[in-house]
Image (cartoon, coloured by chain):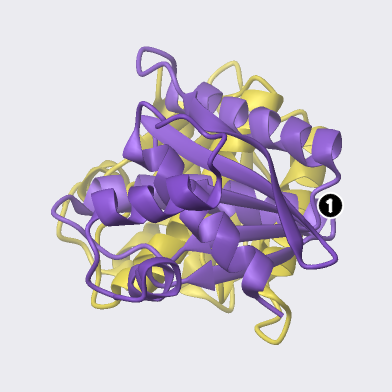
Chain colours: A purple, B yellow
Amino acid sequence: MVVLGIDPGFQFSGFGIIKKENNKILLLECGYLKLNPTKHLSVRVQEFYDYFDEKIKKWGITDIALETSFLGKNAQNFLKLGYLRGILYLLASQHKLNIHEFSPTEVKKSITGYGGAQKDQVARVVLQLFPGLLMPAKNDVTDAIAVTLCGTWAK
Amino acid sequence: MVVLGIDPGFQFSGFGIIKKENNKILLLECGYLKLNPTKHLSVRVQEFYDYFDEKIKKWGITDIALETSFLGKNAQNFLKLGYLRGILYLLASQHKLNIHEFSPTEVKKSITGYGGAQKDQVARVVLQLFPGLLMPAKNDVTDAIAVTLCGTWAK
């Protein structure tokens, strides 16, 4: 089982890739994709597609893990977040991957034991689990690793 | 110029395909795609992708026309509508198509002369423009033809 967890966004998309073997978990890669806001929306959507298509092939991904999104202040941004999520659903079908969604509360509870945990608390637990991991520059990355971990615990 | 206009939806996606040549317009095809609600969301997203990918290749589409979506009663349905819109943006980039968006008011105003027109009034004008067209079973189709027409009038 090799899980790609993604926290998608048009500014930064944090991601983590974790392999689970005999109850051992190994963080293969983590980081984020930054899309160029000056490019046409359709080009950014394709860059997002191409980037994760390549990761899926490179690491032999079997599962995608995502956090369920909820409407924030800006409905049009929420709709556009749907564009990226749609791409992940397409990739899941094209590569025959399982796709798992977790609510933000489920993710925080699974990681820290407390559903109302702050991003920093999530980050701290993630860093404890992977001692070799330096503090990533963005919480998007630790958030994505958190949802990736939830994916490895899913049936 | 060959315009594919789409009114995307997980129940029905109406579409129209119009060719513009020397100021003459020709309706090449219209209809709707119905996705099977019992299939996994990722499979439906791929069916939507494959269906319009094939139409784009078959008719040599140069432009996509879409109506801008606004948040309705159900935020999660609105997010999922984004999945399908994201697929259309991906297809636009993959096939190097122009993509045009029009607000519902722009579409109604362009077609009927009145931005507050009802769906039936839009349908009537569309049927007058294409006398060979039988009344489609769904307003989704006449709506999609209306947005396709707006696409042919775009620069």
Q: Which residue is under mark 1?
A: A95
Residue B31 or residue A105, whichever sits in front: A105
Residue that appears at 61% across and 35% down: B90
The residue most toward the top is A38
**Looking at the image, can residue B101 be seen?**
yes
Q: Is residue A92 above or below residue B1?
A: below
Q: Amino acid at mark 1?
A: His
The answer to which image quadrant residue A25 occupies is bottom right
Residue that appears at 40% across and 24% down: B154
Q: Work out which quarter of the rendered image holds the C terminus of chain B and state it.
A: top left
* Residue B5 left/right relative to B61: left
Residue that appears at 61% across and 29% down: A46
**Looking at the image, can residue B112 be seen?**
no
Residue A147 or residue A69, whichever sits in front: A147
- Badge 1 marks a residue whose secondary structure is loop
Residue B104 or residue B79, whichever sits in front: B79
Residue B152 percent location from the top left of the image = 49, 30
The residue most toward the bottom is B38
The answer to which image quadrant residue B45 occupies is bottom right
Q: Is residue B51 above or below residue A42?
A: below
* Residue B85 left/right relative to A121: right
Residue A105 percent location from the top left of the image = 33, 74
The answer to which image quadrant residue B120 occupies is bottom left
Residue B9 percent location from the top left of the image = 51, 66
Mark 1, Cα crowd under 10 Å, few <14 / some 14-19 / many 20+, is: some
Q: Work out which quarter of the rendered image holds the N terminus of chain B and state it.
A: top right
Question: In the rendered structure, the residue with mark 1 lies on which chain?
Answer: A
Q: Is residue A99 above or below residue A77?
A: below
Count of numbered labels shown in the rendering: 1
Residue B40 percent location from the top left of the image = 70, 76
